[in-house]
Image: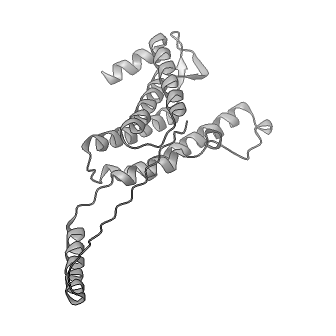
């Protein structure tokens, strides 16, 4: 599911000099311009705003476009259909990783946002790995795989992603309507309940790996 995040920041610096002769004004303006350039060149550059903008760009399309395809599934076998869908989801997640992974090496002014950014990137990598290793679908206690039903690990990833997006929205200038926030909160609550009610052999395996 794609989430909507936007941040627009405009920074302007103005210097006004009053009560001087024209020659003094020109001289002082030249000095001030030089000082401003020197200050700007020494000012540390952070990536907080760029990260939020990239998150917005990646999540601004409608959910229906996320895995859109021109493939005629009616002409394919169930196995071929499953393969194509899997490739589409992996490709979509990889596109996000490719755009965001640079922030692992860049510096944020807000260290909490930096930690959240790293956590979000790691989460995307985990989701991609679950699909590639066929661990995104539920496995019954008897070991039978339930195709089309999310695994315990996948539910946890979706739950964590909802939480991260909501945290961006609540604390990092996300442009998100109250209705959209409410939808995400409801989805997060539903996922939390599914996690609490979950029973399956993959739950024990996941908890063992986490521990």
Q: Foreground residue, 135 or 50?
A: 50
Which quadrant holds residue 173?
A: top left
Location of residue 164 by image quarter = top left
**For residue 79, above or below residue 27:** above
Q: Nearer the viewer, residue 11 or 197?
A: 11
Q: Residue shown at 47%/35% (left/top)?
A: 127
Res. 95 visible in picture: no
198 to the left or right of 74:
left
- Residue ID at (75%, 34%): 77
Comparing 80 with 61, the one in front is 61
Residue 47: percent from the left, percent from the top? 33, 54
Could you tell me residue 35's position as x and y percent?
Answer: 19, 75
Q: In which quarter of the image is the N terminus?
A: top right
Q: Report the residue at 37% width, 53% height from top.
A: 49
Answer above or below: position of 90 versus 199.
Answer: below
On the rendered image, what quadrant is the C terminus found in? top left
């Amino acid at each position: 599911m794609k989430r909507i995040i936007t941040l627009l920041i405009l920074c302007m610096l103005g210097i006004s000099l009053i009560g001087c002769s024209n020659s003094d004004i020109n001289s002082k303006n030249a000095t001030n311009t030089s000082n401003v350039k020197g200050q700007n060149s020494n000012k540390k550059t952070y990536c907080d705003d760029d990260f939020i903008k990239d998150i917005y760009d990646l999540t601004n399309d409608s959910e229906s476009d996320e895995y859109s395809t021109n493939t005629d599934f009616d002409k394919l076998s169930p196995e071929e259909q499953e393969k194509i869908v899997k490739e589409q989801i992996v490709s979509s997640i990889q596109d996000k990783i490719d755009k965001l992974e640079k922030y692992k090496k860049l510096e944020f002014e807000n260290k909490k946002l930096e930690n959240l950014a790293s956590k979000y990137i790691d989460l995307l990598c985990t989701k991609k790995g679950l699909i590639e290793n066929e661990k995104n679908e539920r496995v019954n206690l008897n070991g039978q795989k339930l195709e089309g039903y999310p695994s315990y690990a996948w539910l946890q990833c979706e739950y964590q992603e909802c939480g991260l997006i909501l945290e961006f929205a609540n604390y990092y200038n996300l442009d998100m309507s109250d209705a959209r926030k409410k939808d995400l909160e409801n989805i997060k609550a539903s996922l939390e309940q599914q996690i609490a009610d979950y029973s399956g052999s993959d739950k024990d395996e996941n908890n063992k790996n986490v521990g």
